[in-house]
Image: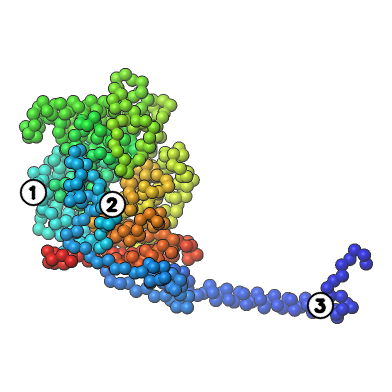
Amino acid sequence: MAGQSTPYYTPTAKPNTTHLLRKNNLLLTCIVFFLCSFFYLIGSWQPRAITVTSLPTTTINCASTSTSTFNSSHKDLDFTTHHSAAATDDGFNVKTYPPCSIKYSEYTPCQDQKRSLKYPRDRLIYRERHCPEKTELLKCRIPAPYGYTNPFKWPRSRDLAWYANVPHKDLTVEKAVQNWIRFEGDRFRFPGGGTMFPNGADAYIDDIGKLINLNDGSIRTAIDTGCGVASWGAYLLSRNIIAMSFAPRDTHEAQVQFALERGVPALIGVIASKRLPYPSRAFDMAHCSRCLIPWGQFDGVYLIEVDRVLRPGGYWILSGPPINWQKHWKGWERTKEDLNEEQTRIEKVAKSLCWKKLVQKGDLAIWQKPINHLNCKTNPKFTQTPPFCPVQNPDSAWYTDIETCLTRLPEVSNNEEVAGGAIAKWPKRLGMVPPRVNSGNIEGVTPDIFQKDVILSKKRISYYKTVDNQLGQPGRYRNLLDMNAFLGGFAASLIKDPLWVMNIVPVESKADTLGAIYERGLIGTYQSWCEAMSTYPRTYDLIHADSVFTLYKDRCEMEDIMLEMDRILRPEGSVIIRDDVDLLVKVKRIADGLNWESQIVDHEDGPLVREKLLFAVKLYWTAPADSDQGF
């Protein structure tokens, strides 16, 4: 009939088999359904294998110094040939790294004393960072001293350290009167004394607490310039205040090393010609207790730098010369006129910065930075020397010259508004969106991204603790380093554990998030991992490296970053590295060459994610007993 299509099968072409086809199709469908269900159940029953290696996600005993054995429960599903750490055709062969000579036991590449002699002594420039050239980099493993022992657990470590770990007695003699440190048999004891607090750091902090409120959470982050062995920072921790302590590597040998051995945050550093490696508006409180910094000299440049890193409304505390010179001038072996002139210069610089002197009582003097610069622009009482800096990036602080101009605070609309945004009291500020993020000042980082990072970080920490059972044991780790911290989620997720995290924002990162990290009440510093960190060997118990090798691909050598990690990691310390599987396989080869015990495991979201994790432990080894022979 017109308009009708002729079917492929017609009654005249073939017998009518429609009813037979219906029966056969129904039977075939049943058979296929049965077979699919059967093989699905069989597949689900089989143990899942890790796609990177044939080894399952297994808890690592990070305290062990023997090689752990991991066995796959199903040898047929072995993907080792695809992601092997053995030598391949890419030219990246396994290389072993021998021990260095014992003379490098305390090697800090960018603060090497011999190299520093090449630089000017004016304004302590020779004590700043001066890193070795690429051809000078060591390709060996830094040895621990013979007899090295894991540090005392916190809080005992605040008061005790093993002599074998930091074999220096000079401070016990030089600072005997100040009660910094005592030598007792096989250990050091830290009584908590200081040059300006002979009754101990606790009593000294109590005196400060009578002048400003240290207990309501408004003060969380602090910076201690010329920290000695960091007793001030050590005793602040019990008040939920975390201090970034720093001191130069100078004649008082091992000050910062002692601080870190005690489990107190510290870096080697000095205020000289470069900005401190911290963002603007980072610290609630700054402190100097006889730190011997000439605050009134060089047009007040050092106080100008303190002003840059001090938060609006933050405090600067000074004790020691010239404060209370009327009482101490004879003991300081200086004239009344000299000390009076020094204090006058300091007062003048502080006033030019629009600081208000709150109080001077006994040996303490405290100034407060204004919450904004509205009055500084209009009030004739404030001199405009130094002038306001031109438009600049106030957070730029990696080899950035200090300037003798006042860092501008963000604009405000009235006298009561806090420049840059008000920050909640601790601990509430930890979970709140940082003002820098809320205002959109960090490119590509929104409040939504911040909230997602909070959730993601908690998920990651939970997973880490299932693999590294030592991380799940409070007190096993004390000093932690996050090599690429982003918004500080790793540190924030561990805040209830008795530990602290040094959050690093690499200077090569796309987004500068270190200011937001400080606004959360955490601490950190800028760093380029193409250079060594300003810290001693054996500083950290655990290192976390998220996408570090992706960031530095084609920027510097992978092995140099790994050697630096080995230098600053304690014997029996742990490493968690996250990265693309192809890079991670190369990282594992280097880890094997460093004699680390390591294992690649799946991402927390399963085996189909290209990003994998490497968990590693630096095995225990030291210099030989006859250290004079070296290696």
Query: What residue did someone put label 1 on?
Result: 173
Give the mark, 2 or 3, whose residue is nearer the N terminus.
3
Give amino acid for label 1: Val
Image color mode:
rainbow
Name the residue at 31% across, 40% down: 400
Quarter where residue 81 is shown: bottom left
Mark-to-mark CA distance, 3 and 1:
106 Å
Q: Is residue 203 depicted above or below 27 in this figure?
A: above
Judging depth in this view, the residue of 602 and 190 nearest the camera is 602
Query: What residue did someone put label 3 on?
Result: 19
Residue 577, position in %: x, y? 37, 60
Q: Residues within 10 Å of mark 1 (few under 14, many from 20)?
A: few
Q: Is residue 257 depicted above or below 87 in this figure?
A: above
Mark-to-mark CA distance, 2 and 3:
81 Å
Give amino acid for label 3: His
Can residue 352 be seen in the rendering of this structure? yes
Q: Assign a secondary structure to mark 2.
A: loop
- Looking at the rendered image, the quarter that the N terminus falls into is bottom right
Quarter where residue 354 is shown: top left
Judging depth in this view, the residue of 292 and 28 nearest the camera is 292
Q: Is residue 279 depicted above or below 16 in this figure?
A: above
Can residue 425 be seen in the rendering of this structure? no
Residue 9, position in %: x, y? 84, 75
Residue 576, position in %: x, y? 36, 60
Q: Left or right: where does residue 447 sit relative to residue 378?
A: right
Give the mark, 3 or 1, whose residue is nearer the N terminus.
3
